[in-house]
Amino acid sequence: MIIESRPWDDPAGTALREAQRAELDARYGTADHEPGTPPSAADIDLFLVALDGTGKAVGCGALRRLDATSAEIKRMYVAPGSRGCGVSTAILRALEAAAVDRGWTTIRLETGPAQPEAMRFYEREGYHEIPLFGAYAGSTVSVCYERSLTRTFAAAQVDGRSE
């Protein structure tokens, strides 16, 4: 698998985000399930696309800066046929490493109750539920998570692990 930084309007990335939107519309039964500001080329700092061994785009994820020390994960998605193969973990680790490279020590994200697989994934990967933040405050379709990267990546460097 290869993970590449691509422009927000990259055709493969756009197709993945459209597939994600269709899946979420079906899960929530409405197209109105994003309480926050939708990401755009103007406010995304990094957009990654994962490619399988044949070069097919199978997943994506983005980072949007929140402040000097934190960022939000946006549009994390893996195509259904590629789930369970480590794509989501690889994208998440690449996003976290990019955040550390930019000096961001906290990663936040928003998901929702109709996405239990996402909630389990983030909890398994060391994220903990936090109060709703920013535009998500008061939302009935949001669950927010956070992870501090300072300890995680410092520990990995001390004992030689690569996350």
Image: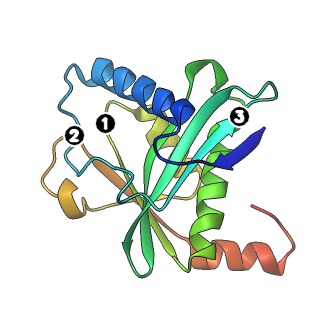
* Between 141 and 39, the one nearer to me in the picture: 39
- 57 left or right of 75 in image: right
Q: Quadrant of residue 54?
A: top right
Quadrant containing the N terminus is top right
Q: Position of residue 69 (x, y in %)?
A: 44, 80
Q: Which mark is residue 26?
A: none
Q: Position of residue 98 (x, y in %)?
A: 62, 65
* Between 108 and 123, the one nearer to me in the picture: 108
Q: Amino acid at mark 3?
A: Leu
**Residue that label 3 marks:** 51
Q: Which mark is residue 141?
A: 2
- 22 left or right of 103 in image: left
How far apart are the two marked residues, 3 and 1, measured between alpha carbons? 28 Å
Quadrant containing the C terminus is bottom right
- 44 left or right of 152 in image: left
Q: Position of residue 96 (x, y in %)?
A: 60, 62
- 84 left or right of 7 in image: right
How far apart are the two marked residues, 2 and 1, measured between alpha carbons? 6 Å
N-terminal label among 3 and 1: 3
Residue at the (61%, 74%) spot, across then down? 100
Q: Position of residue 37 (x, y in %)?
A: 23, 51
N-terminal label among 3 and 2: 3
Q: Residues within 10 Å of mark 3 (few under 14, many from 20)?
A: some
- Numbered disc 1: secondary structure: loop
Residue at the (63%, 27%) spot, across then down? 83
Q: Amino acid at mark 1?
A: Pro
Q: Residues within 10 Å of mark 2 (few under 14, many from 20)?
A: some
**Residue that label 1 marks:** 113
Label 2–label 1 contact, CB within 8 A: yes
